[in-house]
Image (spheres, rainbow, N blue to C red):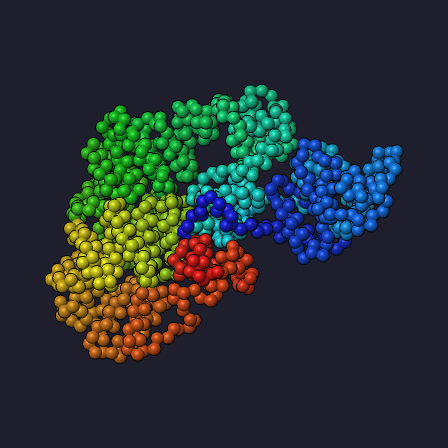
């Protein structure tokens, strides 16, 4: 799995053909019916459902391998050619008839096969009766099939066949004994009344083996399987499979074409090991599906087409009266519209059978006609009790009646919120807020209603910001209205993680708001968060105290929101009081609004626990947050939780699959920039541990972006990691430069919680520069802050800082023992990688003290631990040290290949470069698809790429594949 989007134009060439899914029972019945003697098999189903695919699968199966099969197709000609499908099929089967040794009957074929006139017998005398002449022709065609030894005659799309072709099939079916198996596919809804096909399907000859197969659409699970088979057998997210099924109704052709269209438009992305769509919104009608639908519509009379257009405008099931209101006349074409199969009736309500067909007809309807019908639909539905406000909002918007649309859209959003349909409410409110005719005074009121836990997409947030700024620029609001709107602007900017800009707007707003108002309390608690780089802890604490006072007069649900925000801010400031406040959050929310606050609390407390080094507590909070976010579909929360979890797993040494998870998050367009940066940071830390030369550049990017976004609490960790890389290269001045501003910010604000990694790195840089007194002062200040706090990560960072000073002789004590204490402190969290790095320094101190045996014994254990983690850079240092001391370095268990591909991985990559899917590779190499997928992921990781295409290109360029 890699977090990459699909490529653009032409990308569909890289996709696989879909596998046959969900048809095992049908294929088995097919094979069983034709395994013995001749039989008649009727395969029915709507367009695109997979009748032809089922036939092809049978023809390629072991059962059909020893049978001579002839496939004829009936094209949708307005005037079908007499016996055209049979004639074309025979022409494809043989280029000549001289060797068939036909009887005198063959002469009857001369009119059908003029190119074979020289090889056919002479034309027999014409019978006086036309029916006798046709019978003679049928006997001649049957003789050709017999001479060609055709065991199976398959006729596709028989609903379009001419009458003579149908009569010929009846002739073949009536022969006794049956000599040739007949397989026909057709669409029941397109069979004309009185068609001879009905006789073939309703009266099988006595003694004939018969099978009628009704091919049904796929369910959601099989829809996902079909898409997976097109995307290298990799998993598809349940939400994406559900979306596709809802829009395609499980029709395989529509599924395939929709996925190809999404793929070509780079609208597919891999997240958390699964393919998904960037945004789970409407799917465009694929051209192939659109053309097929419109071709069927074109065959109808104008009244029937008008009925379909009206039904497409309504889109929802409607009764005849409503449909008639749109046409402003009688429903003369209703019977034909139903008979064509595009429309259906269920309980007196009329609607399209398939969503994509409805959209195809709607989009093909001229815009002026659509607008007129939307207006008539709105007028017809407005009189209902209760009014269908969502439908009315849509109709009046499409009709161009903005005032009516705004009225009904807000009512629809309120109803959606009451029904806990946050996605629906969000969409309606966003449309209202970003409409160019939005009244400025409505902006703040509408933004307040948006459930931001379910609001995602950077572009949509930017749209809100533009609308709110435009409302403020209108200069039509009172001071209080303007302040409310400015607060909402600051709130949106803060959610976007544009912290400095958000706080600046809130400071302007708070002076014009009533002190006891909800907005004022929310602003105060937001300003209590340590986003402002220069403000000390005391300033933030003052805002938080004011927020607590203001919240006392608020309703309980709003008081809970302020409590969550206040506890979160206290924890981020490094205040123990925050944990006591967090314990006041209820564990079992009573409603969705309460759940939103509680879930945010669990999420924030989990993040805080990671920073404090209370990892077991962090895991519990994040698990609870994830469960609640899933239950209530808090989409934005889920991404933040996932990002915090990858950070936690980095610290705990749970690195298996971590690179793939971080890549998926980094490429998730639904996440806000700073949340994505957390994943990018973890990815860079993994690269640094692996010795990737690009790790430093990536850390510099994270550091620059956190500065730009004003995410003060995130600056310290990338600065510390970059400092360590620079020190390893001997770039002491650069290491000091990188840590100058972050450590100054920590000291000025007084939030040493952020210094768990930064303090040891800065101390090492100061020692390397010979600035020992500064190093000692730094560690002393850090110790003063840590002393009264239960912050295990900071305590471990302090122990490591003290060990660095001991090694430099700045403080008294045995350096090796000091590093051992640091390693023990890290391991208790647990942070195994940091513990092993501390032990590596312990090894160096033991060697310097002449305790070689103890040093080398410890070095072997540390090397084993680093190798197990995958920390190649440090492992190579230890291995080199051991070799320098004549200690043999042996791998444990299966051979490790480092950055090189193993022989089994190389086999997989070579096959992948030929365009094979995981399933195909698995068959060739006799492995499971899961094993193949794992080996591809390993190869991608080793070659530093994040897609199958990039892996193939990298392997070719490096000479691994020729």
Quarter of the image for residue 612 reads bottom left
> Residue drawn at (56%, 22%), measured in percent from left and top?
327
Quarter of the image for residue 493 reads top left
Q: In the figure, 232 relative to 450: above or below? A: below
Q: Nearer the viewer, residue 903 or 305?
A: 903
> Residue drawn at (28%, 36%), measured in percent from left and top?
489
Q: In the figure, 462 relative to 206: above or below? A: above
Q: In the figure, 200 relative to 845: above or below? A: above
In percent of width and height, residue 944 lies at 38, 58
Q: Nearer the viewer, residue 828 or 12?
A: 12
Q: Which quarter of the rendering shows the N terminus?
A: bottom left
Q: Nearer the viewer, residue 344 or 128?
A: 128
In percent of width and height, residue 928 lies at 52, 61
In percent of width and height, residue 15 lies at 51, 49
> Residue drawn at (77%, 50%), measured in percent from left and top?
148
> Residue drawn at (14%, 69%), measured in percent from left and top?
809
């Amino acid at each position: 799995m890699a977090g990459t989007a699909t490529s653009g134009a032409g990308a569909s060439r890289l996709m696989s053909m879909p596998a046959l899914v969900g048809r095992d029972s049908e294929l088995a019945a097919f094979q069983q019916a034709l395994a013995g003697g001749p039989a008649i098999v009727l395969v029915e189903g709507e367009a695109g459902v997979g009748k032809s695919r089922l036939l092809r699968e049978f023809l390629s199966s072991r059962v059909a391998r020893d049978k001579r099969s002839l496939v004829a197709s009936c094209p949708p000609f307005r005037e079908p050619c007499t016996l055209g499908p049979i004639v074309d099929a025979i022409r494809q089967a043989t280029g000549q008839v001289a060797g068939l040794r036909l009887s005198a009957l063959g002469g009857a074929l001369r009119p059908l096969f003029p190119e074979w006139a020289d090889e056919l017998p002479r034309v027999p005398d014409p019978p006086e009766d036309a029916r006798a002449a046709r019978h003679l022709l049928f006997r001649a065609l049957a003789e050709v099939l017999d001479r060609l030894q055709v065991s199976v005659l398959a006729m596709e799309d028989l609903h379009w066949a001419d009458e003579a072709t149908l009569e010929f099939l009846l002739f073949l079916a009536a022969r006794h004994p049956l000599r040739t198996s007949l397989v026909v596919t057709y669409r029941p809804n397109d069979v004309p009344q009185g068609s001879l096909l009905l006789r073939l399907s309703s009266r099988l000859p006595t003694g004939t083996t018969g099978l009628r197969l009704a091919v049904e659409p796929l369910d959601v699970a099989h829809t996902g399987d079909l898409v997976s088979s097109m995307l290298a057998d990799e998993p598809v997210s349940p939400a994406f499979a559900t979306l596709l099924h809802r829009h395609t109704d499980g029709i395989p052709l529509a599924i395939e074409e929709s996925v190809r269209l999404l793929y070509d438009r780079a609208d597919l992305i891999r997240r958390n090991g699964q393919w998904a769509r960037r945004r789970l919104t409407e799917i465009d009608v694929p051209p192939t599906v659109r053309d097929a639908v419109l071709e069927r519509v074109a065959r109808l009379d104008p009244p029937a087409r008008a009925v379909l257009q009206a039904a497409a405008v309504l889109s929802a099931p409607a009764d005849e009266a409503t449909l008639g209101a749109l046409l402003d006349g009688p429903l003369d074409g209703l019977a034909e519209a139903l008979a064509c199969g595009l429309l259906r009736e269920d309980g007196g309500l009329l609607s399209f059978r398939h969503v994509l067909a409805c959209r195809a007809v709607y989009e093909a309807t001229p815009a002026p006609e659509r607008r007129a019908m939307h207006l008539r639909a709105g007028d017809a539905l407005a009189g209902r009790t209760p009014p269908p406000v969502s439908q009315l909002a849509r109709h009046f918007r499409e009709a161009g009646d903005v005032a009516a649309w705004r009225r009904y859209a807000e009512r629809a959003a309120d109803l959606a919120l009451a029904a806990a349909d946050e996605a629906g409410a969000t969409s309606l409110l966003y449309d209202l807020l970003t409409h160019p005719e939005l009244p400025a005074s409505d902006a703040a009121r509408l933004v307040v209603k948006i459930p931001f836990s379910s609001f995602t997409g950077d572009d949509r947030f930017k749209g809100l910001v533009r609308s709110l700024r435009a409302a403020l620029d209108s200069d039509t609001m009172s001071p209080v209205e303007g302040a409310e709107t400015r607060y909402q602007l600051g709130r949106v900017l803060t959610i976007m993680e544009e912290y400095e800009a958000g706080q600046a707007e809130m400071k302007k707003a708070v002076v014009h708001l009533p002190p006891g108002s909800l907005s004022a309390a929310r602003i105060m608690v937001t300003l209590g968060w340590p986003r402002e780089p220069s403000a000390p802890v005391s300033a933030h604490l003052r805002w938080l105290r004011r927020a607590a006072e203001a919240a006392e007069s608020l309703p309980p649900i709003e008081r809970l929101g302020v409590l969550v925000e206040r506890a979160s801010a206290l924890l981020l400031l490094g205040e123990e009081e925050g944990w006591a406040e967090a314990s006041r959050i209820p564990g079992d929310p009573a409603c969705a609004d309460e759940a939103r606050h509680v879930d945010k609390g669990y999420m924030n407390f989990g993040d805080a626990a990671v920073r404090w080094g209370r990892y077991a507590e962090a895991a519990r909070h994040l698990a609870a947050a994830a469960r609640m976010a899933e239950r209530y579909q808090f989409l934005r929360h889920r991404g933040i939780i996932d990002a915090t979890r990858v950070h936690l797993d980095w610290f705990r040494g749970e690195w298996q699959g971590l690179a793939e998870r971080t890549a998926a998050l980094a490429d998730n367009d639904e996440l806000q920039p700073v949340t994505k940066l957390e994943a990018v940071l973890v990815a860079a830390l993994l690269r640094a541990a692996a010795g990737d030369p690009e790790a430093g550049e990536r850390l510099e990017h994270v550091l620059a972006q956190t500065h730009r976004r004003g995410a003060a609490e995130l600056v310290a960790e990338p600065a510390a990691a970059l400092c360590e890389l620079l020190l390893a290269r001997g770039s002491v001045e650069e290491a000091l430069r990188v840590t100058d501003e972050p450590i100054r910010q920590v000291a000025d604000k007084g939030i040493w919680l952020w210094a768990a990694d930064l303090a040891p790195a800065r101390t090492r840089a100061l020692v390397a520069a010979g600035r020992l007194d500064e190093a000692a002062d730094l560690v002393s200040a850090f110790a003063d802050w840590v002393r009264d706090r239960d912050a295990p990560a900071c305590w471990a960072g302090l122990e490591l800082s003290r060990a660095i000073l001991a090694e430099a002789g700045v403080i008294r004590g045995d350096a090796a023992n000091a590093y051992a204490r640091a390693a023990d402190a890290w391991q208790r969290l647990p942070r195994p990688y940091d513990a092993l790095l501390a032990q590596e320094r312990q090894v160096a101190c033991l060697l310097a003290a002449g305790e070689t045996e103890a040093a080398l014994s410890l070095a072997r254990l540390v090397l084993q631990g680093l190798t197990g983690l995958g920390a190649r850079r440090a492992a190579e240092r230890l291995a080199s040290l051991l070799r320098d001391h004549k200690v043999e370095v042996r791998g444990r268990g299966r051979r490790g290949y480092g950055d090189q591909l193993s022989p089994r991985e190389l086999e997989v990559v070579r096959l992948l470069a030929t365009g094979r899917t995981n399933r195909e590779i698995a068959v060739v190499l006799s492995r499971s698809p899961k094993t193949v997928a794992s080996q591809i992921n390993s190869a991608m990781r080793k070659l530093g790429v994040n897609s199958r295409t990039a892996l193939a290109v990298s392997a070719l360029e490096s000479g691994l594949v020729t």
